Amino acid sequence: MILDKIKSRRSVFPNQFNAEPISKDKIATLLEAANWAPNHAKTEPWRFKIFKDDALELLTEILRSGYTKTTTPENFSELKLNKSIEKVMQSGAVIAICMQRDPKARIPEWEEIAAVAMAVQNMWLTAGELGLGGYWSSPGFISELSDELQLSAGERCLGFFYLGSFSGPANEGVRTPIEDKITWK
Ligand SMILES: Cc1cc2nc3c(=O)[nH]c(=O)nc-3n(C[C@H](O)[C@H](O)[C@H](O)COP(=O)(O)O)c2cc1C
């Protein structure tokens, strides 16, 4: 049942990935799932930049640039930076999650961000079925990377999806009861 799949989807972090490479076909399947997300006014605002193989090195340089730009010299920690570089290098691929704003702004921006998040959920659920794990990372400097990610006008990066082969066990899921969040009228 789909509910079981939704409930068993977990964030899987790079130190949980195994070294098995991810095929381009599997990534294409994830992206196809993403492409079928609902969206308002047919804007299909999701954009994805896939970093794989040699491009993972490039991503580490992009992260270094974002961290350096937004961190004062007193707070700069080579250790922290190296940890984020290590996460990239432990991954089979990393996908930058981006949103392309409708040039005519026919709908509010939040609806386009919501549509991108739905695309990510499609991708995330599909990953589980393909023996992949991943999580959405949203570093504080994400809005500073437009040049490095070569974003188009009106395009925003909303985070990175770290992806790797994964054979479990997954972390325990934690949620408070839905009853605490609903009001029957
Ligand atoms: C929009 C969004 C941004 C997130 N950013 C981060 C992040 O920067 N770092 C992180 O460790 N997890 C991040 N997560 C993953 C959450 O920590 C994770 O989904 C949450 O702990 C629930 O765990 P689960 O996904 O296994 O159910 C993000 C999730 C979403 C939806």
Image: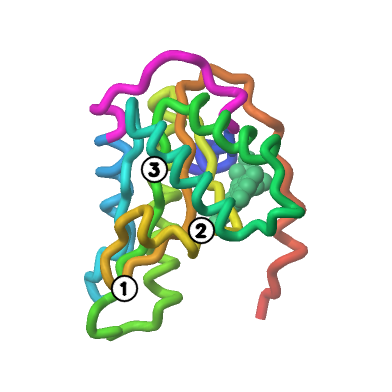
Question: Of callouts 3 and 2, which one flags the residue occurring earlier in the amino acid sequence?
Answer: 3
Asked whether residue 22 is drawn in magenta, I would say yes
Real-space CA distance between mark 2 and mark 1, rounded to the nearest whole angstrom? 15 Å
Tell whether 79 sits left or right of 123. Answer: right
Q: Which residues are magenta?
A: 13-27
- Secondary element at image label 3: strand
Q: Answer yes or no: disc 3 within 8 Å of ligand 1.
A: no
Which residue does the numbered mark 2 point to in the structure image?
142
Which residue does the numbered mark 1 point to in the structure image?
154
Question: Of callouts 1 and 3, which one flags the residue occurring earlier in the amino acid sequence?
Answer: 3
Q: Residues within 10 Å of mark 2 (few under 14, many from 20)?
A: some
Q: Nearer the viewer, mark 3 or mark 2?
A: 2
Amino acid type of the residue that numbered disc 2 sits on in the rendered structure: Ile
Q: Residue placed at 23% from the left, 84% from the top?
A: 104
For residue 131, what is the image quadrant?
top left
Q: Residue placed at 54% from the left, 41% from the top?
A: 135
